[in-house]
Image (cartoon, grey):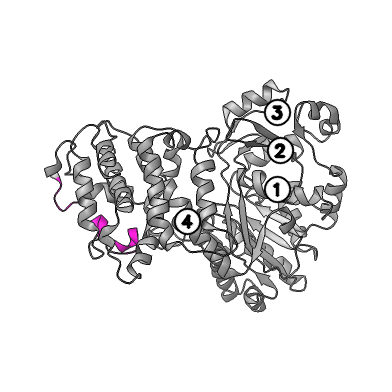
């Protein structure tokens, strides 16, 4: 079995291999989409193919829509050239169940794939023509939080952005500049309505996208590159909306184990590609089963009934509450705790950490005992059910090849939301003494210990990328492994920094407790393990 539009017509072969096929006519879907495109998506990676495209496929299977999605990649064109085009824009979704079984389905909802860049002249012209169509309802994104950034760490515009602002919209380089240039094409066609929908895993994602778009648009209007009315169009929610969303699904890099299982079943399209930009991708996507997409229901040009495929539509306030529930209590803090200690103990899989008695107990106590009392309840999802699924189904799934080293990336940027919000919630709670918290301070101490770059045996370990890594490690240079007394005031610049934790931990009464845990973790080999055993 090879992944192409002709092979999937041989139903019997695929059925025998246990692979579900689309229930709609692929050629008709492609034709309808070209004629009246409704949905363009930027960011053609695994979360898009393994979740968003599958949601659209469900509607196509139900005969609730006729058109598919047009996928656009603006960062890594090899994804289009090596993964989309050769396989007629099809992919194989493999859901990895905790019992080891695999659910396999051909995803055929992607009608067209384009490289979103002016150097690809045909693709760029096609994109401009799509944005001029009245039928276009949704322009969505999974480009990671960094994709929306216009400024570097010092606050200056990125080089591509600076060049775009100077040169105008004819040759845009940065993704946001491209979006603004394409939106202007839509404006010129009669101020056609549309929704720009960020589906990235970052807080207030719609607002982040909107702010970046407005920055580029205002500069170009001020310089005379665009009509003044364009700003009014962008700012009018009745014409251009930027709904907030919360997305949750683990779609890790392609697994060799899954590849071998697919080959054994007779499925041949399994080459795992590592592009020049270090994207790991394959014709198949392996993913966990649980998934959540909560969307603010703001679509000026209408939308398809994605709620029939499990998408939650609600108001902005509820989206914000769902995001806070997940990021501040029910998932992300647990992930970070496992990431930090997993690196210190040499684990390579999150699922293996959940077999570790101390680590399993740690995340249970962080979630149930210190998180849930101040959890934000969104109404449409039950936090107790959500965290139970995380701890009992999702994190222990042995078939999800997710690594603590990946999750430990950019931890300094995650701490204020994943733990700081909970600490601030307790500060607001009358009569509560933050000094009584035990497990969140253990994670913070563990992270500081991780920053030494030595595992629990005192051996050097590679740290994950983090924009503050050099600065943070600079504070710890005098600390010696095996010598707890070498800790002076070295942690003070870290623990007192409200940018890291949302507050000054010393003023909150937790700084000294974190220092105490950290000092014990310096005692020598297995000291980190001994601290967990002592306090859990």
SS assignment at label 1: helix
Magenta residues span 487-503
- Looking at the image, residue 270 lies above or below residue 67: above
Tag shown at residue 53: 1
Is 472 colored magenta in this rendering? no
- SS of the residue under disc 2: strand
> According to the image, label 3 marks what residue?
269
| CA distance for labels 1 and 3 | 19 Å
Residue 476 higher or lower than 194, as above or below = above
Q: Residue at x 19, y 49 (%)?
A: 516
- Quarter residue 303 falls in: bottom right
Separation of residues labelled 3 and 2 (CA atoms): 9 Å
Q: Residues within 10 Å of mark 4 (few under 14, many from 20)?
A: many
Quote the CA–CA distance across marks 2 and 1: 10 Å
Do the numbered discs 2 and 1 sit on residues whose CB atoms are within 8 Å?
yes
Secondary element under disc 4, as helix, strand or loop, is helix
């Amino acid at each position: 079995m090879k992944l192409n539009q002709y092979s999937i017509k041989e139903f019997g072969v695929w059925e025998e291999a246990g692979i579900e096929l689309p229930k709609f006519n692929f050629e008709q879907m492609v034709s309808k989409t070209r004629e009246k495109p409704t949905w363009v998506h930027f960011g053609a990676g695994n979360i898009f193919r393994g979740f968003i495209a599958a949601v659209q496929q469900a509607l196509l299977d139900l005969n609730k829509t006729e058109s598919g999605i047009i996928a656009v990649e603006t960062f890594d064109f090899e994804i289009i050239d090596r993964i989309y085009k050769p396989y007629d824009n099809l992919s194989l979704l493999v859901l990895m169940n905790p019992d080891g079984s695999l659910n396999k389905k051909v995803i055929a909802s992607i009608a067209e794939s384009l490289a979103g860049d002016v150097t690809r002249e045909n693709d760029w012209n096609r994109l401009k023509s799509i944005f001029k169509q009245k039928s276009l309802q949704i322009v969505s994104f999974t480009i990671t939080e960094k994709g929306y950034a216009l400024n570097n760490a010092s606050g200056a515009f990125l080089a591509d952005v600076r060049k775009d602002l100077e040169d105008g919209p004819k040759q845009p380089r940065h993704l946001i500049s491209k979006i603004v240039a394409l939106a202007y094409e839509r404006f010129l066609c009669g101020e056609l309505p549309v929704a720009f929908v960020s589906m990235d895993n970052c807080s207030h994602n719609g607002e982040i996208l909107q702010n970046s778009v407005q920055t580029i648009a205002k500069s170009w209007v001020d310089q005379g590159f665009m009509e003044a009315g364009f700003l009014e169009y962008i700012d009018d929610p009745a014409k251009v909306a930027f709904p907030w969303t919360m997305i949750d699904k683990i779609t890790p890099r392609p697994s060799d184990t899954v590849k071998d299982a697919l080959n054994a079943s007779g499925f041949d399209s399994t080459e795992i590609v590592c592009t020049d930009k270090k994207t790991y991708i394959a014709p198949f996507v392996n993913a966990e089963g649980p998934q959540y997409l909560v969307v603010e229901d703001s679509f000026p040009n209408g939308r398809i009934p994605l709620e029939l495929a499990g998408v939650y539509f609600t108001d902005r306030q509820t989206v914000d509450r769902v995001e806070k529930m997940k990021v501040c209590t029910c998932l992300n803090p647990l992930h970070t705790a496992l990431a930090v200690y997993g690196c210190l103990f040499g684990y390579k899989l999150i699922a293996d950490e959940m077999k570790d008695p101390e680590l399993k107990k740690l995340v249970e106590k962080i979630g149930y005992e210190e998180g849930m009392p101040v959890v934000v309840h969104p109404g449409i999802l039950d936090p107790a059910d959500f965290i139970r699924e995380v701890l009992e189904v999702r994190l222990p799934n042995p078939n999800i090849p997710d690594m603590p080293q990946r999750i430990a990336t950019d931890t300094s940027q995650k701490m204020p939301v994943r733990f700081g919000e909970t600490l601030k919630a307790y500060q607001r709670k009358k009569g509560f003494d933050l000094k009584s918290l035990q497990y969140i301070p253990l994670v913070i101490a563990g992270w500081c210990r991780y920053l030494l770059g030595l595992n629990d045996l005192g051996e050097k370990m590679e740290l994950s990328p983090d924009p503050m890594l050099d600065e943070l490690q600079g504070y710890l240079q005098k600390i010696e492994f095996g010598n707890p007394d070498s800790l002076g005031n070295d942690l003070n610049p870290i623990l007192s920094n409200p940018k890291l934790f949302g507050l000054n931990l010393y003023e909150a009464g937790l700084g000294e407790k974190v220092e105490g845990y950290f000092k014990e973790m310096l005692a020598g080999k297995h000291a980190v393990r001994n601290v967990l055993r002592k306090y859990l």
